[in-house]
Image (tube, coloured by chain):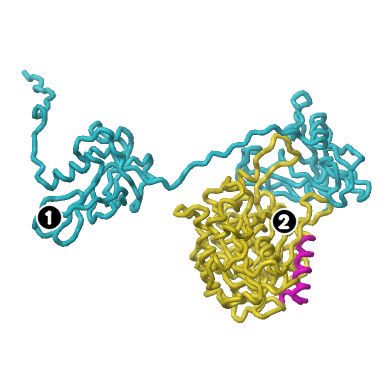
Chain colours: A cyan, B yellow
Amino acid sequence: MTSEPLVADHVLEFPGGYTRSTGPVIGRFLTELRDGRVVGVKTAGGRVLVPPLEYDPATGEPVTGEWVEVGPAGTVTAWAWVHEPRKEHPLDRPFAWALIRMDGADTALVHAVDAGNPKAMRPGLRVRPRWKTDREGGITDIACFVPEVTMIVSPTRAEYRIRASASLTRFLEGIRDGVFRGGRCAACDKVYVPIRVSCPECGNVIGEEVELPGTGTVTTFAINNLPDPRAPEVPFISAYILLDGADIPMIALVGGVPAHEVRQGMRVRAEWAPAEERTPSMSSVKWFTPTGEPDVEL
Amino acid sequence: MGNRCAVIGVGQTKYTTKRQDVSIAGLVREAALRALEDAGLTFADIDAVVVGKAPDLFEGVMMPEAYLADALGAAGKPMMRVHTAGSVGGSTALVGASLIQGGVHDRVLVVAFEKQSESNATWALSTHLPFNASLVVGAGGYFAPHIREYIRRSGAPAHIGTLVAVKDRLNALKNPYAHLKIHGISREMVESTPMLWEPIRYLETCPSSDGACAMVLASEQAVTGTPAWVHGTAMRSEPIFRAGRDTVNPQAGKDCAADVYGQAGIADPRRDIDVAEVYVPFSWYEPMWLENLGFAAEGEGWKLTESGATALDGDIPWNASGGVLSSNPIGASGLIRFAEAALQVRGMAGEHQVDGARRALGHAYGGGAQFFAMWIVGSEKP
């Protein structure tokens, strides 16, 4: 007859923890930490050890009694990212273990860097301690290190009320009603669409309004392979369309035809949204689509 | 044209994707100090400062000229800001030159910059107002149709744009300040990159750069060091929307060139100019501007490109520095063209020096190809 193995959880922990004499060197370091300072000790050879050691690892000789304050900043020399912190780790979110050489020190100490993202970590990163408020004289008096401030976010926002000009209103109301409204300059005899107040050629006031059909010719175009809010699907065609009777092209979408079948000189017509859905906005023209007529010689 | 004016100092930062180690103030100061060092001067020797910058909404720093006065040593001096869209760098040099030519000042510091890594240019150029009659497209979407029309009119073969994309990047390898350093750049590499706004491929477009450029301009009696003399200056503009406007070969560009050539006594630009730094942000704009600037007859510009005439070892090198196609801190890009033209005639262009360059064209354009700025600089006094 087989029996279950005897299994139980067990904790090996001396009640209250061991006591341990620090000795003069480590004690000084911990005392300074409690006061919010990081200090190093000099070796006979002049090196500054942070964290301090009692005996110079290079020579075995005792370190000198000479202390120097280092930091407050330091430089990351190496690091490893902790994706899933354990409960005994100093931070409850992903962080980096890093070797940090405090300014003025010749050696590096190990501590946590609260960088938020592994992409923020690199050798050479400048960091500073984030001190705990209640300090007891231990290395965890430094809660962690944090990167220095090198970038700020500067929100920019202006809210204002826009009133469309009289001519643009007139044009967009035409779009709502399914017509393109242009204006003829009496001096130049040129028809501008959208309708505008004055002629960009001669400066004259444009008085005569003309209604243009929703047909025209593609003079030239781009095949756009980068998405745009107005045309989320790529490729899309943005084209210069010369409406019949106009002397200046409009920039608009061309659709209802594969992108690589669009041609310069292609005849197109406006594809209107259904009348009940139209608003005074260019979104009332879905796009321009081929009429099927022969191309125009440009 | 007024009093004589010379470029006596040029300073540039190394153009790069991100300069996160400096603020905008630190960036422009770096260029300004290098220009002053080149001229053997300090801020104390400068009478006035002119700053050029693309739209404020790019970096969201409103009135950067006010913020930058300290960094440019302008306290207690006249300071002004210039803005003419992409041509602003060129216009900035010309405003500075006009202060010398008009006899107002003896030494003027001109500076232009862009920090594209902290700029939101595409957002700033297409803010989608509630009422609009036109489809809003970015720079590539705006210029691609005009390039298509150029190709149709001229009958240029499809690989011409590729040749420019390769040529300018080869030149950039010789320029220590150039941003893009594409070792092994070739037609195959360019042609393997995707069409962004057909007919413009990825490697036929300019990069986004952080950088600043500065020049010290001086009157004749205030010249120090090696001068590049200004032989002609011109600016022109035209409305973006005008019936009959030729967007492929804009009239303002032709008029601007005719003006600046007239001042400099240039009858045949291909013969009389030794090197040109021309604003070519998309590769096809080289053949287009070759025609617009009179280096080739209409419809013939692409043949000049194809023949290798515009290469560093050709008879009329264009963009020996690598041009806008290799470095594009937008606000500074025009000033860099003007500064590189000056470096060439001073014989200080280093590895991309055109041997014996005596007269050079600096050119910039902006907006919907509606602003133009040009100068001719020479090694000899005009």
- Mark 2 lies on residue: B369
Please report the residue visible at 48 percent of the width from the left and 65 percent of the height from the top: B183
Label 2 environment density (alpha carbons within 10 Å; few <14, some 14–19, many ≥20): many
Residue A85 in percent (x, y) is at 28, 35
User: Can residue A17 be seen by looking at this rendering?
Assistant: yes
Q: Distance between the residues labelled 1 and 2?
A: 72 Å
Q: Which residue lies furthest to the front in this view?
A: B76
User: Can the viewer see residue B319?
Assistant: no
Residue B167's image quarter? bottom right
| In the rendered image, the vertical position of residue A83 relative to residue B352, given as above or below | above
Q: Is residue B263 magenta?
A: yes
Numbered label attached to residue A63: 1
Q: Which residue lies furthest to the left in this view?
A: A1
Marked residue chain, label 2: B
Residue under mark 1: which chain is it in?
A
* Residue nearest the viewer, comparing A17 with B150: A17
Q: Is residue A98 left or right of residue A204?
A: left
Instruction: Look at the numbered discs 1 and 2 and tell me whether their residues touch, using CB distance below 8 Å.
Output: no
Image quadrant where one finds the N terminus of chain A = top left
Residue B313: x %, y % from top left: 60, 76
At label 1, the amino acid type is: Val
Please name whichever residue, B210 or B11, is drawn nearer the observer in this view of the structure: B11
x and y, in percent, of residue A283 in the image: 72, 33
| Direction right: furthest residue | A186
Looking at numbered disc 2 in the image, what kind of residue is underneath it?
Answer: Ala
